[in-house]
Image (tube, rainbow, N blue to C red):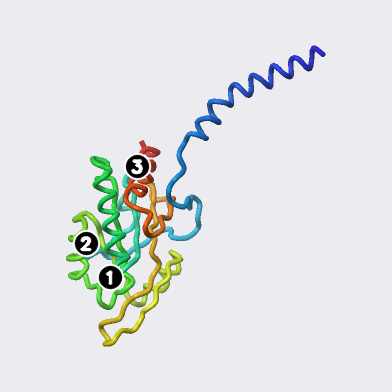
């Protein structure tokens, strides 16, 4: 009987110690994006930007990096996504300086450095556009599990590109953490970026 009472007291003490931890876990809001922590794909890139400088994830240590695949002549998805990214940066206030937007072209035939410079400037001057060569693009897309396909138009230069429409998000250490579906919204994106920045301190 005495032993049972001791066990009950120990159980009660353990529960009291665990309660704040459990409450903290329960109260912590979930990410708005899909948590990809530990995924073995979309691990990085080594590509020239619109200014001819080669870029890797290591260049952006200390920042949250958002990577989006698209093309400059995209009529809707790409400008909407980049617009939301620019708005998320604005919503972050001073922390916006620690957000790096990266656009990777799936249309290297038309997306020259000059074209990409003008395109990125219309969203945010700090955002970078990266270009894989036509020979490099298939392997890069496979490494990121990104879909793209050329859809012929009325003329040889009027084609469009079907492509995946989501964004990969990396923490300040360059680790893949989240995937945001198209249309998630600037507020949700800003919230997740802020949480990753807070994790880093």
Q: At x 69% / y 19%, what residue is drawn?
A: 10
Q: Is 147 placed above or below 168 here?
A: below
Answer with the quarter of the image where residue 2 lies: top right
* Circle 3 residues within 10 Å: few <14, some 14–19, many ≥20: many
**Looking at the image, is mark 2 or mark 1 nearer the viewer?**
1
Q: Is 15 placed above or below 141 here?
A: above
Spatial separation of the CA atoms under disc 3 and disc 1: 30 Å
Spatial separation of the CA atoms under disc 2 and disc 3: 23 Å
Is 46 left or right of 42, judged from the image as shown?
left
Q: Are marks 2 and 1 in contact (CB under 8 Å)?
A: no
Element class at badge 3: helix
Q: At x 48% / y 50%, what residue is drawn?
A: 37
Element class at badge 1: loop
Q: Earlier in the sequence, mark 2 or mark 1?
A: 1
Q: At x 19% / y 70%, what residue is drawn?
A: 115
Of residues 75 and 141, the one nearer the viewer is 75
Q: Position of residue 39 (x, y in %)?
A: 50, 55
Residue named by callout 3: 194
Please identify the quadrant where the N terminus is shown: top right
Please identify the quadrant where the C terminus is shown: top left
* Circle 1 residues within 10 Å: few <14, some 14–19, many ≥20: few
Of residues 132 and 6, the one nearer the viewer is 6
Answer with the quarter of the image where residue 110 lies: bottom left
Q: Position of residue 162 (x, y in %)?
A: 37, 74
Residue named by callout 2: 120
Residue named by callout 1: 75
């Amino acid at each position: 009987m005495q032993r049972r009472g001791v066990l009950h007291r120990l159980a009660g003490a353990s529960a009291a110690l665990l309660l704040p931890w459990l409450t903290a876990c329960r109260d912590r809001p979930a990410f708005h994006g899909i948590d990809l922590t530990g995924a073995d794909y979309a691990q990085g890139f080594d590509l020239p930007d619109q200014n001819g400088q080669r870029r890797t994830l290591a260049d952006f240590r200390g920042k949250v990096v958002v990577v989006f695949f698209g093309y400059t002549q995209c009529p809707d998805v790409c400008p909407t996504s980049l617009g939301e990214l620019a708005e998320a940066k604005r919503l972050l206030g001073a922390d916006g300086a620690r957000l790096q937007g990266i656009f990777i072209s799936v249309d290297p035939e038309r997306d020259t450095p000059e074209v990409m410079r003008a395109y990125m400037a219309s969203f945010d001057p700090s955002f970078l556009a990266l270009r894989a060569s036509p020979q490099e693009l298939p392997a890069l897309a496979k490494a990121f599990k990104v879909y793209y396909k050329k859809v012929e138009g009325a003329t040889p230069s009027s084609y469009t590109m079907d492509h995946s429409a989501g964004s990969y998000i990396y923490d300040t250490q360059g680790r893949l953490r989240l995937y945001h579906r198209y249309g998630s919204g600037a507020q949700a994106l800003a919230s997740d970026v802020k949480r990753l920045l807070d994790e880093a301190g």
